[in-house]
Amino acid sequence: MPKVRSRLIVALTLLFIVSNINAQRSAIDTYAITNARIVTVSGPVVERGTVVIRNGLIAAAGANVNAPPDARVIDGTGLTVYPGLIDSYTDLALPAAAPSPSPSPGGGGGGFFALTAPRPASGPNSTQPPGLQPEVRVEEVIRPGGTEIEASRNIGITTALTSPRSGIWIGQSALINLAGDTPQQMIVRSPVAMHVSFTPLRAGTYPGSLLGVFSTLRQMMLDAQRYRDSLQIYERAPRGTRRPDTDRSLEALVPVIEGRMPVVMLANTEREISRALDLATEFKLRLIIAGGREADRVTERLVKQNVPVLLSLNLPRRTTAAIPEADPEPMRVLRERVEAQQTAGKLAKAGVRFAFQSGDLRDISDLMVNAGRVIQNGLNVTDALRAFTIWPAEILGVQNQLGSVEAGKIANLTVTRGDLFDRNTRVAHVFIDGRPVEIKPARDAAPAQPTSSEPEKR
């Protein structure tokens, strides 16, 4: 009996300890934002309600939701809860780019470009040179932390599509949450898409011209078709059939030519976008345009081919000081500046699906400033919010995980004091994977929004 009683006491003690640990974990992983305005995106706005977060997910959201007794409560009076914002094209979480070496004497190098352009990512044992290696996956090199990620979170961005920086076949992107101690914790989905640029490789390297770029793209996709066919023939009857050589580059293109993986093509001008659309038609690709500065000029084709746009908010602006002695800027430059602010509104009116991306903005805090400019130039606020939330989620195939404040989705939330696009709004809280992250505002005061459609003078 004493032994039985002793064992029972030990068992009860262990049970108490485990229950206590589980209760502590529940308290840590459970939050409730109460009395807040909730912009669900997927449904009507809840003027006063509660969002409950548990174990990294949105457990409940609505006007008649009560905070659980084990939740850490955040009083949301005066706050607005939005889905976490998505930046749909970045190079966040990548190691710093190494500059390309300067060209050897007589090599025909491009001077400044050759000294500053980052080297394309390179995969091991590839049959292709760097810049033409579609097998490169960004998930293999991303790293958590960094000032760029912190700056993005400060303005409410919780998730980003990140891809290798340069090349023609740039490589395969990953959708990442901007928090986590390891790359594995950050990755929401990988790979997401294949990425292509029309920028020739550095001088002295083929393809070094735009004509060569398109010839290379087309040839590699034709080679991928033959590679796939030869593998299928071999797998059906390997006996007596010569085994095809393994080619990681062509193998990586098979999902692209079969339409199982979308391909994102960086294209800004009307001519570039039209060429991308032609290439997509020829090879039956699931095309997404990134950049899209002149996408409003080809809306009919974009709608017909069901091609979405990852629209850059890196709007053109004056980069030199305006001084009386300076020559006036050409009318073409001024027109481009104004038209770039109108593209989003025109795409929405034409029914083209699009999502916002930061492009190569040097100061990420300008992202929301520029969003305000496109709103002032024809895009309604509702569509602007969708272009940061549910539309990129749909385009990138994660609409069941992200993009709206709904029960069951990942608890990525942006909580503001004021409406998201108002110039005096502040980000009060950011939740990523159900956990709050520290916000460090980069500016004491938000820059004033322009009051007309005139281009910015700097």
Image: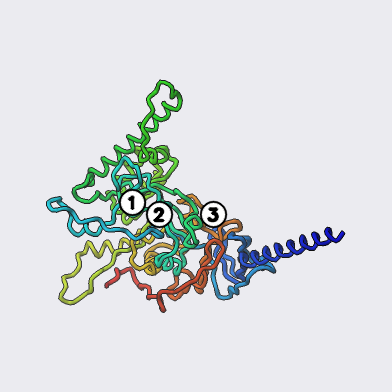
Q: Residue 244, image x and y in percent?
A: 37, 30
- Badge 1 element: loop
Q: Residue 320, image x and y in percent?
A: 23, 71
Q: Residue at x 84, y 61 (%)?
A: 5
Q: Residue 448, image x and y in percent?
A: 38, 75
- Above-or-below relation of 130 to 382: above
Disc 2 to disc 1: CB gap under 8 Å: yes
Q: Residues within 10 Å of mark 2 (few under 14, many from 20)?
A: few
Of labels 1 and 3, the one closer to you: 1
> Distance between the Cα atoms at labels 1 and 3?
30 Å
Residue denoted by label 2: 141
Which residue is more in the foreground, 103 or 89? 103
Point out the tag, 2 or 1, that comes first from the N-terminus.
Answer: 1
- Above-or-below relation of 193 to 442: above
In the rendered image, the quadrant that contains the N terminus is: bottom right
Q: Residue at x 58, y 71 (%)?
A: 36
Residue type, label 3: Gln
Q: In which image quadrant can residue 285 be found?
A: top left
Residue projecting furthest to the left:
106
On the question of residue 117 being in view, the answer is yes
Q: Answer with left or right where residue 368 lies relative to residue 66.
A: left
